[in-house]
Amino acid sequence: MMKDPYGRSITYLRISVTDRCNLRCRYCMPATGVHLVNHADILTYDQIVDIASQAVSMGIDKIRLTGGEPLVRRDVVNLVAKLAAMEGIRDLSMTTNAILLEEHARKLADAGLMRVNVSLDTTDPQKYAYITRGGDIQQAFRGIQAAKQAGLLPIKLNCVIQASSKEPDAQKVRQFAKENHLEVRYIKVMDYAAGIFSIVQGGQGGDCARCNRLRLSATGIVRPCLFSDTGFSIKKMGIGPALSRAVENKPEKGGPCKENWIRATGG
């Protein structure tokens, strides 16, 4: 079992499988997009499996696949199958925008994925297209239904809010969740440069005192905190040392950082 300097047990690893996404959400990236990493620098699936195996041996028992958008990476179902077969993982999930979920939900479930979180900030087609710069909400709706039918439960909706869950779009997402037997979590817009974030309503994200997670970027950087510029390269240091150093350097709480790491390490 890994414990950080503040006595928190580290049992949760979020793995970004790609920095690419099929949407361009306004609160996540500029209209021009962001600089994409060279494919040669992205971890291979075999490398990810090796990292996950070492992490599990050190006490990790919960893994979430993120991006970018994880479903844009080819053959991600095969990665899910390899992780699902790994003894010691009790919770294997994925965060997705659901645009490609209709095609992949059944295959993911059959491979061993347990559940999904779906990013959904509104139920209005026009607003969704505006927020995502062109996304089709009907694709997301069909993906959610496919996930339900495949048994990827519970499905949790991640809804970004400006200030309050009482906002009209947030309330419509809540109603959609109620009608479709889904769960909803509200995530207030974050300011990375200022280090401003809050506890996720309905979840544990942002609750620094209870934080049990590390994040692995698609290029192999282990980050102890989303709101920190600290990172340790697995490619340079090796798997065990990078994981251990990340745990040893996990801050008591998040603070200002130079980069919006959610683009590279997932939320």
Image (cartoon, helix red, strand yellow):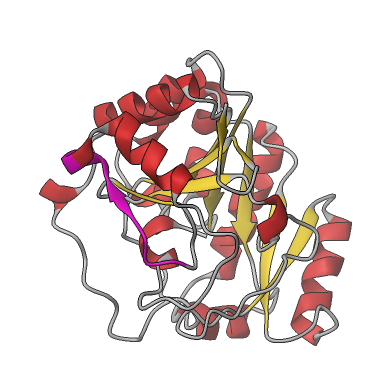
Q: Is residue 222 above or below residue 177?
A: above
- In the picture, measured across the screen, residue 261 lies left or right of residue 191, that is left
Residue 48 shows up from this direction: no
**Front-most of residues 106 and 169:** 169
- In the picture, measured across the screen, residue 38 lies left or right of residue 170, that is left
**Front-most of residues 187 and 215:** 215
Give me the residue at 31% from left, 34% from top.
241
The image position of residue 165, as x and y in percent, is 81, 78
The image position of residue 173, as x and y in percent, is 77, 70
Q: Is residue 3 above or below residue 30?
A: above
Residue 139 shows up from this direction: yes
Q: Is residue 190 above or below residue 263?
A: below
The image position of residue 16, as x and y in percent, is 39, 49
> Looking at the image, how many numbered discs can be counted on the residues?
0
Q: Which quadrant of the view contains residue 166?
A: bottom right
Give me the residue at 69% from left, 73% from top.
198
Q: Is residue 235 magenta?
A: yes
Q: Is residue 54 above or below residue 147?
A: above
Q: Is residue 136 magenta?
A: no
**Front-most of residues 101 and 73:** 73
The image position of residue 265, as x and y in percent, is 40, 57
Give me the residue at 36% from left, 85% from top.
30
Q: Which residues are magenta?
A: 228-236
* Image quadrant where one finds the N terminus: top right
